[in-house]
Structures are given as structure tokens and as C-alpha cells.
Image (tube, coloured by chain):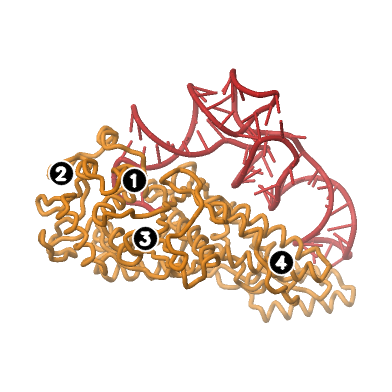
Amino acid sequence: MLRLHNTLTRQKEEFRPLDPKNVRMYVCGPTVYDRIHIGNARPIVVFDVLFRLLRRQYGAAQVKYVRNITDIDDKINNRAKERGVAIGALTAETTRWFHEDIAELGCLPPSVEPTATGTIAEIKAMIETLVEKGYAYEAQGHVLFHVPAMMERPPLPQHVYGLLSRKNRDDLIAGARVDVAPYKKDPADFVLWKPSTPDLPGWDSPWGRGRPGWHIECSAMARTHLGETFDIHAGGLDLVFPHHENEIAQSECCNGRPFVRYWLHNGFIERGGEKMAKSVGNIDKVRDLLDEFPGEALRLLLLKTHYRSPLEFTKEGLREAKADLDYFYRALARVANVEAEQGVEPAGALEALNDDLNTAVALASLHYNSGLALKEDDPAKVRAAKAIIAAEGALLGLLQSSPDAWFRWQPPKSPAAIDEKKIAELIDLRLAARNAKNFKEADRIRTELAQQGVILEDGPTGTTWRRAS
RNA sequence: GGCCCGGUGGUCGAGUGGUUAGGCAGCGGACUGCAAAUCCGUGUACGUCGGUUCAAUUCCGGCCCGGGCCUCCA
């Protein structure tokens, strides 16, 4: 039985989908104006594991995973202007980069990937309903959600504003660090629709030409693809307030139904003890890291820490993740010609993941079984270990490559100093030298290859090689 | 100021009211022509002060420290 930590209750709860034939999850996707950094990648990767787990539990066809692309935003407009490119070109290119990057991190594509600009009609419909119901008002070309209206007339019993983030309106106002816009009736009100200028993207609406505010798009995309109430909504911890709080307000006031049953939030990647963020200037872009390390090492690094804990990012940690994978792949290499046992359950990893996605404990199981694959001689145990490694790897989205490919990986931007044919020739020469007991020459060749980043390993079945880290 | 979250051995990192997490690094050994890899052995930690308890790292409270949200942010 899967248990998940629900931000609504701050407790682990048993996960029971509304409809086991249609399990629905939504993850907040990127605003497409720049390459993602490793912090942005964390929710994509950890909730990819959740997606895999749910698919295994309920069947791949029974799980619907929606992850949006936010392609209308001030940051996008500004970046396009800076770079002198069309907004549509910028968002298309950035979306492509995003897909490339997360594919290298081993993430499955979501079932649906809607865009904000593709959901304008639905957004406008929701805003109209909110105005009709008296939860929103128009002011100077803006439409604003009126927080006091929700306080006075909760759409559902107990569903007042601040339920998720545990903030109340007075606290928010007391802590406000930003001037309140003059057209707001209440300082806590937030924008659903705002006017646009002729040079920027905009759509006609009952309130004039404009564009959606940030929060409403997710409400609209979620409702369109998952319905008024669905199971899981996930994202980074920084989205709890205001983004998710506002989504709840809009959706529940509009629909008159509960919005989301389980809210999941991942902790931050940190660098130097601080949250990794563009505004802090301590980001590492996924693309830059992929130039130095295999994507799988990045993925493993993200899974070595429980998703709700902070994760201090270092290159050293990334090197360790790569070394962990070396071990797993060595185990797979040893059992390459063994036929895996059929019908084996990835029991260790499954049990761990069912406990609020405890990937760290799941990985301990992978280590244990890799150890078995490396040292066991009993054929039955080896066959079982191979099957478990494969199954646990699939659940975690790891070990989908071949050992050969893994050990011969090299940074994409630094092409091989030496090609595989040349390596094979040198290995043959060294073998001849060894057979002639000319160890001096054999060692010279070993050293020569080492200088080219190639490490030789003499085994019972001959000499193999791998690229140094 | 308000509201959250966290402080685990050299390091990373799980977890638990009383019995081993695990990984990495280190050290010792085996294996190897030399290596690499692998294997075996090896480390009794839980911010601080109180409280509850037969028993607390684990529950409660104070304190210290760190981080986050309250503004765009994964």
C-alpha cells in the first residue's frame, strides 16, 4: 500500500485513488524561457518515479500524468526582447531543450503536456464563472480573485483560503514586502487576467485584450485534462504559496468541488547552504552538467536523497553517483550472459517507494542485489539477482543502458582522444607482450592508454577496457 | 514580525521508544606479473538543556544554529 506525505495534513496518508481505473496526477512544469537547472529537474525526476510506481500498481493505461508548459509570462517576454527573437520561437526552442534535458535524465513523457496558450478558452471560461459567482471582480482591465469573498463564502465547508500553506490573510498582509497594487480591493487579492499591450501576446476577452495571470492556467489545464477533482498535484516546495494556494482557491470557488486530494512538494536543491535559484545566482544548468556527466548519474544523485529533504548539490556528489552506477553496471556485466529469473518482484525497492517514495532505501536494495550479482556463484541466486536489479532499475528509471555503453561513455563535448579500433589494437599488442613475459612493454601500453583516459582490466575471460571518469 | 521545515558517525544519507540502515572515503587482508575491479574484515553517531518513561537519537517543552515561504522562484 502506497503512503504519501500530503502537504495538506503534513502527514503520511494512505493513497487511495478516486478511481483506480483512472489515476490522475499533475506536476507543475517549466516556464519556458531558459534551460532548466538541476533544481528545476528535481520534481521532474522524483515525480517520474511516482509515475512509474503508479503505473506499476494500477497499470500503465490507468494512470494519467499531466505536466504543463507555461509559455506566456513576463520573463518570456523580457527574454525574447533581450535576445531579439520572436516569443513563439523562444518558447518553442526552450521547450525542445527542456525535452532533451529531461530525456537524458531518464524521465518518461507525461500523458499530456498542455500549454497555457493552448488553454486560453478554458481559462477565460473559469474566470467568467468566478466573476459570476462573486469570487472575482474587474478593475482597470484586470480581473482579480477576491480572497475575502472566499473567506466569507467558502466553496466547501472548512475550505478557506490558506488551508494548504497554513497562512491567514492577516499574516500575509502583515508580512507583505511588496506594495499593494492600487486596483486591488484587498491586499491578498491576486490577478486572474491582466491587460496586454499591442506588442505583446494577448487575447480578446470580456475584460479587454489581455492574458492570463500565472495561477489560473494550471487550474484550467488541470480541469481540462484531469477533471474538477483529481488525485495528486505535485511541485516544488516554493509553489505551496502562493501558486498552489491560489490554484485551490480558484478551482474550488469555480467548480464548487474539492480540487486535489494529495499535495506533494519536493525540497530544494541547495548550493552553499542556500536554495539554488536564479535570483541567488548559484544555479547549475542541467545541460552544463550533462556535458561532464552521464544523465543517469544526475538522476541517481537526485534519487539518493529523499525528495522532501534538502539536497546540497556538489560535483563530488555527482562523481559519487557515477561511481555507484559503475558498481551496478559491473554487476550487470558479470551476469550479462545469465538468463534472468522470470516473474521476480522488485520487492525491496517497491516496499521502500511505497513509503512516501523512499528512494534512498530503494537504492540500498539495489546495492544489496548488485552485491549478490557480483559475488554469488549459485546460478539460481544469480538469476534472481539479475531479475531484481532489472526490475528495481526499471522502477527507479535507472540501469536502462548496457554495461558496455555505460563504461564507454565520454563527455559529449570532448571527443575521444583515441578510438575503439586503436584501443583494440593496443590491447592485442599488450597481450602479445604479456604472453612473451615482456611486462615492461605491457605496462608501457597500459600507461599509454591510461594517459588517453582508458583503463584496462585483466579478467579471466580476457582484457576489457573502460573510460576513466 | 508571522508561518513552516530541518540539525544523525570523516562524509553523503535512511530510520527507529529498547536489537546492524546503506553508500562513499579511510585502514587491514585476499586476489593480481603490475594494475583495475571484486571479495573479506574494520567505525556504536544522532545540536543543546530540561520533561515524560523501566528505557529517548526517536515523544513533549525551552534554547541555539541553519534553511524556506510571506515577491518571481522547482
Question: Which residue matches tag 3?
Answer: A30
Of mark 2 and mark 1, the one earlier in the sequence is 2
Question: Which residue matches tag 4?
Answer: A330
Query: Which three-letter amino acid code belongs to the residue tagged 3?
Result: Pro
User: Which colour is chain B painted?
Assistant: red
User: Which colour is chain A painted?
Assistant: orange
In the image, residue A67 above or below residue A419: above
Question: Which residue matches tag 1?
Answer: A241
SS under mark 1 = helix
Question: Which residue matches tag 2?
Answer: A184
In the image, residue A376 above or below residue A431: above
Look at 16% across and 43% down and name the residue there. A181
The C terminus of chain A appears in which quarter of the rendering? bottom right
Q: Is residue B45 left or right of residue A207?
A: right
Please tell me if label 2 and label 1 are on a single chain.
Answer: yes
Q: Position of residue B71 (x, y in %)?
A: 29, 45
**Mark 4 and mark 3: Cα distance apart in space:** 36 Å
Marked residue chain, label 3? A
SS under mark 3 = loop
The N terminus of chain A appears in which quarter of the rendering? bottom right
**Residue A3: mark:** none
Query: Which three-letter amino acid code belongs to the residue tagged 2?
Result: Lys
Marked residue chain, label 2? A
Of mark 4 and mark 2, the one earlier in the sequence is 2
Q: Position of residue A133 (x, y in %)?
A: 17, 53
Of mark 2 and mark 3, the one earlier in the sequence is 3
SS under mark 2 = loop
Query: Which three-letter amino acid code belongs to the residue tagged 1?
Result: Phe
Q: Specify few, some or many for label 4: CA neighbours under 10 Å numbering under 14, 14-19, or 20 or more.
A: many
Q: Position of residue A417 (x, y in %)?
A: 61, 72
> Of the residues tagged 4 and 2, which is closer to the observer?
2
